[in-house]
Image: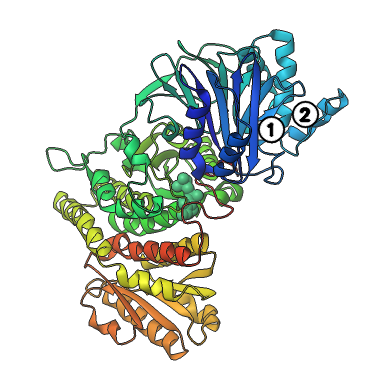
Amino acid sequence: MCGIVGYVGGRSALDVVISGLRRLEYRGYDSAGVAVLADGGLASVKKAGKLANLEKALDEHPVPAGPAGIGHTRWATHGAPNDVNAHPHLDSAGRVALVHNGIIENFAQLRAELEERGRHLSSETDTEVVSHLLAEAFSSCADLAEAMRQVCRRLEGAFTLVAVHADEPDLVVGARRNSPLVVGIGDGEAFLASDVAAFIEHTREAVELGQDQVVELRRDGVLVTGFDGVPAEDVRAYHVDWDVSAAEKAGYDYFMLKEIAEQPRAVADTLLGRIGSDGALSLDEVRIPAAQLREVDKIVVVACGTAYHAGMIAKYAIEHWTRIPCETELASEFRYRDPILDGRTLVVAISQSGETMDTLMALRHAREQGAKVLAVCNTNGSTIPRESDAVLYTHAGPEVAVASTKAFLTQLVACYLVALYLGQVRGTQWGDEIATVIRELADIAGAVEDVLGTMEPVRELARGLAGKNTVLFLGRHVGYPVALEGALKLKELAYMHAEGFAAGELKHGPIALIEEDVPVVVVVPPPRGRSVLHDKIASNIQEIRARGARTIVIAERGDEAVRAYADHLIEVPPTPTLLQPMVATVPLQVFACELATARGNEVDQPRNLAKSVTVE
Ligand code: F6R
């Protein structure tokens, strides 16, 4: 939530900051602003709404070119999304400019202190408090990094802060607690951003900032210290293994369309390098010793939103292949119910961004109770893998559209791998059984490609439903989380009432929602799997159709048993039952994207949302 950029070097700081913000707009788009150090002073422009509004304001009121600057794109927490609450926030003298991602929990008390000292604050934000505190601290120590450290020691909550001061024209200072911030190292220049995407066109050499660290950016290098001023020893540099083309739309109208199309590659990439020369699964990044994994007597999967749906599917695979009891829980609920955890519990935390605060808090709670945590994550160097005992990276590449697509499919691949690996280590799966599933997983990339090639009728159907108010989704077994995911995609993109149900629950209440012509999407499991599952859902389709529903049936190609009850049939290639979510979800992504477009909604930046949810 909120995108932050900082730059110092030989280029125009304004140009670098604006192009960085363009790549970070997915993180928040309520308002945007910049501040540039130039001619011994500080120039700042900020505007409510999307980045385009800021660019227009900059055309009307140009700021001078300078070597250092900061920028921000906001997802509002404290205060309405208007010009005044937009970042950067300046102190009263206009010498300090500050941008912030996160929430300062003790801001009310700090604001009261400042007001008692006669300071006037003009916005409703928690951030402005920090710019005033920073100006006060600077006036006594004349060192922006030291002032930042002093202020950070007083702050509670989650924050990434980046600041400049007119008296230090070649310096940008950043600080990080519980929110993302990465440093980019160039030749005679340096960058700061919430995500490497902001500077990937200039450098792929990055440095990860740790918890409670302050970084000073100068043209000739960076210095990282703790909030206590002690130089950091654990500074980890890394090379970003994707390039600028991965962060661009490549001719697609929306990032979401591009990311849907990238799924076959992403799925294949996530499988790459996981099989050792002896044919056994080798998950290099899973550094929890095999002996400890053999001791595990309970698995808890924690995640939010789409990642939670991946976790729900993981439960079926984990229990089936390992026979270890597994629960999947919303990360935002997990720690509040005082879960029973100990050294024999394995917690699997799934997160595309690696920064979701609810998931981070859940994993911290789990580790405090002695549980081991394995992260499934798509973002190298992010907080969740850093704080976990082990990580399995998905190789989806950058996901920019707010609605998650390729991350979901690769999370599924990673979860299947975790389940198989546990089965291998504990001996509940034989080598040949694992090899069979791996072959089936390897075939999935082709099956997804096949689905993508047959989506025109789905798009046409979506366009025809643009005037509807409600769409319901039904599934059983692993089809149930697919139904939930289909409904989530539709809510967030098309702003329609969409609900997913376990098909068996229908008769316990939700069937009352069925009336003439209500569209109901039904995910049908493969008939060759557990036939009882298939037969039950075939009966459910008949029940709703008898009550007037318009049935949209996703079924395996050649499944003649359900054809007669389908008003619209979406066929997917044959897969094993447990892997079917990987093909059944794809038409639902396309459906939601097309419906959103038909309703005139912004596909990549749905209202009220942001890509990376760094507040609880
Ligand atoms: C929905 C969506 C969200 C995320 C959720 C978790 O399309 O993208 O529901 O899945 O906010 O995000 P990560 O995976 O970054 O922890």
Q: Identify the residue at image location x=59%, y=34%.
A: 58
Secondary structure under badge 2? helix
The mark nearer the N terminus, 2 or 1, is 2
Q: In this figure, which residue is indicated by the disc labeled 2?
A: 110
Please name whichever residue, 332 or 305, is drawn nearer the observer in this view of the structure: 305
Please name whichever residue, 297 or 88, is drawn nearer the observer in this view of the structure: 88
Instruction: Give how far across and how far down residue 436 sits, in percent.
Output: 16, 55
| Total numbered labels | 2
The circle drawn on residue 127 is 1
266 horizontally vs 232: left or right: left
In the rendered image, is residue 412 in sight? yes
Q: Measure how far apart labels 2 and 1 are at the Cα level.
A: 11 Å
Q: Choose top left, top right, bottom left or bottom right for residue 166.
A: top right
Q: Does the residue labelled 1 lie within 8 Å of ligand 1?
A: no
Instruction: Give how far across and how far down residue 160 sits, in percent.
Output: 58, 30
Q: Which amino acid type is shown beneath numbered disc 2?
A: Leu
488 horizontally vs 294: left or right: right
Q: Residue furthest left?
A: 278
Badge nearest the viewer, 2 or 1: 1
Instruction: Give how far across and how far down residue 17 sits, in percent.
Output: 51, 29
